[in-house]
Image: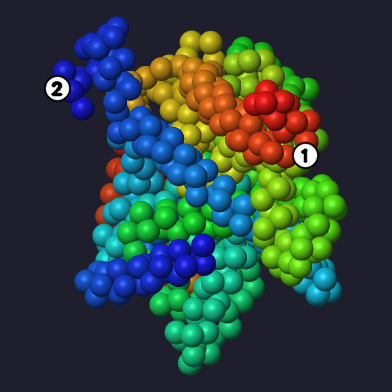
């Protein structure tokens, strides 16, 4: 076993050296791959979505070689700080709690309201059972209000809980819920929305100030030439700047 | 894959299904069955080695070694698997990188622990962040094998320890009376006879290991359960050429069949092995075999 690991290590080392010469800096982009339209795995089995397109463009502008990695939402921050990848680009809202552990670039989408999706439009959210994904701002929000929250590991599970009647409504980013409500006649968006979160940004290790500056500059340049707004509109992920 | 798949919205029925089941994502799903089988094939023997080492150490008359063996089985068996997979693997990975960092970048002066961050020099990264994705996946796979082997090795050690004690004392005494050293008695008398006592416990462990593979995704290795969940999830027409509702139940049914088949094959193999190992043993099954043969 130890021999196997050493061999792999040796392989990784030699191959890595050969690569390092030709490419320059490689940045590994960590995403969840289960949150349409932000990031998802397409029919070909590749990472796709708003953040794929955005990330590739940012890397081009910052002259970095980027590699996409998928990781479970639950362990997405621990794996970043231990160095398994270099950025989180997974529809992650900038919050003070997360900011204590990791650093964020400037937001690449403005703060947007979260919406409720339910089977009927007369659900009273204060007395209802609300589904939310574990570790999201929405789950924290519902818990703070003192309402009943049921947490699920993936976004898909939260919607399935509403369909099966396990929860009365799901609270999530409107951009995730809107396409579902559009295609499923049984589900509706409630009128009530919650203004939570401070916009979505890329997460980086606190010690990676240089990389953060590069991505910040790239995001700024996309904001300035309007290409970021165009991308937001194309994928309908948020309001524009 | 097929020529007629270029516009999936225009086809239906079996043709649609044929196209749907051959998308790149489905191919990755089929491939992950191989990943799981390889993982099992590699992990089982490695875990046995760990277990055998642990059991032999626990039996040792050299106190530190015996304490090590007993401590290993007691501690690892007491820690939940998920905790092991979340924290131990990260620690293991950081341990490797720390060693490489010390060797490769001796004149690096920044601290390795910076708040929550674990920072080593770029050359010490394992694998290097410039290496292709398959290298990272292979590395994750080997970390998984190692972690599984340590966890299941502890259980196997306990099973083997018990099995070693189950071999009748008279057998060892006889060996010693014939002038064998302790080492000879261990390898020639004890080890060949202990397996029949260990087999039921080891068989159970194997069955549990078979079902433990979804823990792989915590290491970034995409296993069959991950793909089944993703493929079965609702697909909207906006994001997929093959929109469908929540089909997870069908994918999980397919997994059920796979796991039942695997269990069935394992049961058969274990039954044959039990029969073979019972041969000539002073157990009820061994006695029955002897009578049938006579």
In the current view of this chain or complex, which residue is farthest to the bottom?
A: B107
Chain under disc 2: B
Quadrant assignment for the C terminus of chain B = top right
Residue depicted at x 43% and y 28%:
B231
Residue B109, x across and y down, in percent: 53, 90
**Residue A223 sits in quarter:** bottom left
Residue depicted at x 49% and y 17%:
B250
**Residue A157 sits in quarter:** top right
Q: Which residue is mark 1?
A: B282
Mark found first going from the N terminus, 1 or 2: 2
Query: Is A149 situated left or right of A9 in this image?
Result: right
Q: Which mark is residue B3?
A: 2
Q: Note whether B44 is above or below B236 in the view shown.
A: below
Residue A14, x across and y down, in percent: 31, 73
Quadrant assignment for the N terminus of chain B = top left
User: How many other residues sit within 10 Å of disc 1, few (<14), some (14-19) or many (≥20)?
Assistant: few
**Residue B182 sits in quarter:** bottom right
Q: Nearer the viewer, residue B234 or B260?
A: B260
Q: Note whether A128 is above or below B213 in the view shown.
A: above
SS class of the residue under badge 2? helix
Query: Is A85 situated left or right of B4 in this image?
Result: right
Chain under disc 1: B
Q: CA distance from mark 1 to mark 2?
A: 65 Å
Q: Nearer the viewer, residue B218 or B260?
A: B260
SS class of the residue under badge 1? loop
């Amino acid at each position: 076993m130890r021999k196997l690991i050493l061999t792999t290590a040796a392989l990784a080392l030699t191959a890595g050296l050969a690569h390092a010469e030709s490419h320059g800096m490689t940045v590994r982009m960590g995403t969840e791959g289960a949150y349409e339209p932000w990031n998802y795995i397409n029919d070909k089995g590749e990472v796709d979505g708003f953040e794929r397109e955005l990330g590739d463009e940012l890397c081009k502008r910052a002259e970095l070689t980027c590699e996409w990695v998928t990781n479970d939402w639950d362990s997405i921050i621990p794996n970043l700080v231990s160095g398994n990848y270099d950025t989180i680009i997974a529809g992650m809202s900038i919050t003070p709690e997360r900011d204590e552990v990791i650093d964020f670039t400037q937001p690449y989408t403005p703060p947007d309201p979260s919406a409720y999706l339910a089977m009927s439009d007369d659900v009273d959210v204060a007395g209802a059972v609300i589904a939310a994904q574990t570790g999201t701002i929405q789950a924290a929000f519902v818990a703070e209000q003192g309402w009943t929250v049921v947490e699920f590991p993936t976004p898909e599970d939260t919607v399935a809980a509403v369909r099966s009647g396990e929860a009365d409504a799901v609270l999530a980013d409107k951009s995730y819920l809107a396409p579902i409500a559009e295609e499923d006649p049984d589900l509706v968006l409630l009128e009530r929305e919650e203004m939570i979160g401070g916009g979505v940004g890329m997460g980086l290790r606190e010690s990676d100030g240089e990389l953060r500056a590069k991505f910040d500059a790239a995001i700024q340049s996309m904001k300035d030439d309007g290409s970021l707004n165009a991308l937001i509109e194309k994928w309908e992920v948020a309001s524009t700047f | 894959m097929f020529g007629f798949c270029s516009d999936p919205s225009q086809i239906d029925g079996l043709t649609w299904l044929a196209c749907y089941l051959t998308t790149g994502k489905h191919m990755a799903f089929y491939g992950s069955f191989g990943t799981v089988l390889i993982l099992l094939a590699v992990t089982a023997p490695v875990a046995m080695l760990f277990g055998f080492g642990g059991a032999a150490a626990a039996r040792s008359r050299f106190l530190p070694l015996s304490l090590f063996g007993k401590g290993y089985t007691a501690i690892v068996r007491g820690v939940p698997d998920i905790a092991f997979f979340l924290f131990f693997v990260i620690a293991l990975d950081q341990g490797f990188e720390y060693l490489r960092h010390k060797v490769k970048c001796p004149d690096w002066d920044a601290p390795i622990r910076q708040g929550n961050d674990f920072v080593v020099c770029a050359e010490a990264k394992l694998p290097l962040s410039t290496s292709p994705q398959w290298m990272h996946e292979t590395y994750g796979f080997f970390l998984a094998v190692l972690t599984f082997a340590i966890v299941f090795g502890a259980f196997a050690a306990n099973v083997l320890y018990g099995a070693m004690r189950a071999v009748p004392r008279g057998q060892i005494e006889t060996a010693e009376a014939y002038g064998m050293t302790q080492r000879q008695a261990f390898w020639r008398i004890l080890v060949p006879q202990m397996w029949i006592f260990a087999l039921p416990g080891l068989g159970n462990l194997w069955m549990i290991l078979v079902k433990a593979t979804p823990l792989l995704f915590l290491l970034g290795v995409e296993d069959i359960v991950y793909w089944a969940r993703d493929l079965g999830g609702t697909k909207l027409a906006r994001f997929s050429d093959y929109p469908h509702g929540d089909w997870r139940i069908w994918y999980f049914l397919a997994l059920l069949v796979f796991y039942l088949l695997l269990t069935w094959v394992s049961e058969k193999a274990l039954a044959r092995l039990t029969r073979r190992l019972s041969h000539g043993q002073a157990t009820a099954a061994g006695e029955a075999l002897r009578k049938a043969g006579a």
